[in-house]
Image (tube, grey):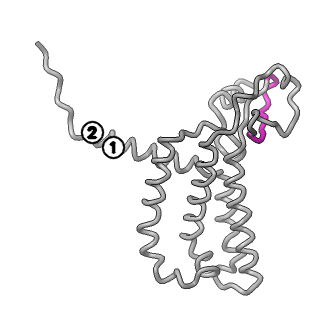
Amino acid sequence: MEMAAPRSRSSSSVSVADRALRGVADLIKLLPSGTVFMFQFLSPLVTNNGHCAAYNKALSGALLALCGGFCAFSSFTDSYVGSDGRVYYGVVTARGLRTFASDPDAAGRDLSGYRLRAGDFVHAALSLLVFATIALLDADTVACLYPALEVSERTMMAVLPPVVGGVASYAFMVFPNNRHGIGYQPTRATEDFQRKN
């Protein structure tokens, strides 16, 4: 009778590390990558590196609203690869996917599987929460719009990301995200098709 080999400590720690990395990957997938890049690129410009006048505050508020709105909107978009190999993006509705560009084969394709779900609203709220966390941790934005937070920023930087990460990870577990909308990574099928051509 053979006994199973005892599980080594390193294999269980790898398992924990693997789960932690998957959680971080889920957080990264929560926000459209272009939106985060645009915010991080434009924030020092519109905030004048944290030295704000009234117009800088207005520009910073507009940038936050635009990026936050796009993060939420992107949660209600999805895509598919048409028979012609193009990726078709659209808005998710109660009846299915409504594409931005017309697919010649759309009549033969069942887009009702892309219906709006409760998880889409959860993902939109979480994307706003994660984006707000990123914005609050940006030193220029804090110095411009919330100068009173500069004193407590170190504490917030230590506490806020793990809390938001825990909430988002739990929500991803309950409402897994399988949308591939605007600003999100393409599907494996899309990547495979593009490599062949």
x, y percentage for residue 76?
70, 45
Identify the image quadrant of residue 68.
bottom right
Foreground pick, 55 / 76: 76
Q: Is residue 87 magenta?
A: yes
- For the N terminus, the image quarter is top left
Residue found at the very far top of the displayed protein:
1
Residue at mark 1? 16
Distance, label 1 to label 2, CA atoms, is 6 Å
Q: Position of residue 88 (x, y in %)?
A: 79, 34
Residue 87: where, in percent of width, then height? 77, 33
On the rendered structure, is 38 left or right of 165? right
The kind of residue tagged 1 is: Val
Q: Secondary structure at mark 2?
A: helix
Q: Residue at x 82, y 19 (%)?
A: 108
Q: In the rendered structure, does residue 107 fall within the stretch colored magenta?
A: no
Whether tag 1 and tag 2 are in contact, CB under 8 A, the answer is: yes
**Residue at horizontal 32%, vertical 41%?**
14
* Other-residue count near label 2 (Cα within 10 Å), few / some / many at <14 / 14–19 / ≥20: few
**Marking on residue 12:** 2
Q: Quadrant of the C terminus?
A: top right
Q: Amino acid at mark 2?
A: Ser
Q: Image height check: is 126 above or below 186?
A: below
Residue 44 on image: x %, y % = 67, 74
Q: Which residues are magenta?
A: 83-92
Count residues near mark 1 (Cα–Cα under 10 Å), then give few for <14, some for 14-19, many for 20+. Answer: few
Residue at (66% x, 44% y) in the render: 184
**Residue 23 in the image: above or below residue 71:** above
**Rendered position, 118 above or below 146:** above
